[in-house]
């Protein structure tokens, strides 16, 4: 199994990163483990082709807000929408999404494009 850290150096250029329901690492002392954070979004942006995108979906609103801050601060990325993205009908539904819906959590989606 490859982690994102292992996989990123392999690719010269990528057209999209889809990040669906990653672990939100809810405790502040664990935020450094979150997948969507500046050091990683900077690296993903370097690997994206122009016009490529990063699509992030979570059911944990504090993580969605944190992700929005991190992605807005990532040089070379631009939000495709004003705020959160609408639901993308082509996106597969996951069991993690269903767990979030069952717990009455809002599903938040972010879509940022490399400019």
Image: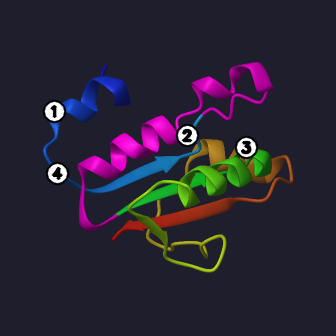
Q: Secondary structure at mark 1?
A: helix
Q: Position of residue 44 (x, y in %)?
A: 35, 45
| In this view, 31 is above or below 112 | above
Distance Cα–Cα, label 2 vs label 1: 20 Å
Labels 4 and 1 touching (C-beta < 8 A): no
The residue pinned by badge 3 equals: 99
Q: Which mark is residue 83?
A: none
Magenta stretch: give its range. Answer: 23-52
Nearer the camera: disc 4 or disc 3: 4
Distance Cα–Cα, label 2 vs label 4: 20 Å
Mark 1 surroundings: few (<14), some (14-19) or many (≥20) residues within 10 A: few
Q: How is the image coloured?
A: rainbow
- What residue is at 68 percent from the left and 28 percent from the top? 31
**Front residue of 28 and 85:** 28
Q: Quadrant of residue 28?
A: top right
The residue pinned by badge 1 equals: 10
Q: Quadrant of residue 93?
A: bottom right
Q: Which mark is residue 37?
A: 2
- Counting residues from the start of the chain, the first of labels 3 and 2 encountered is 2
Distance Cα–Cα, label 4 vs label 1: 9 Å
Queried whether the magenta region covers residue 115, the answer comes back as: no
């Amino acid at each position: 199994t490859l982690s994102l850290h292992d996989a990123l150096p392999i690719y010269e250029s990528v057209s999209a990163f889809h990040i669906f329901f990653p672990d939100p690492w809810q405790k502040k002392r664990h935020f450094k483990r979150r997948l969507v954070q500046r050091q990683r979004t900077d690296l993903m942006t370097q690997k994206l082709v122009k016009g490529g995108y990063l699509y992030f979906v979570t059911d944990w609103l504090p993580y969605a807000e944190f992700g929005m801050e991190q992605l807005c601060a990532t040089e070379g990325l631009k939000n495709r929408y004003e705020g959160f993205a609408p639901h993308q009908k082509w996106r597969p539904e996951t069991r993690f999404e269903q767990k979030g819906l069952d717990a009455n959590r809002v599903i938040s989606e972010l879509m940022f494009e490399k400019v």
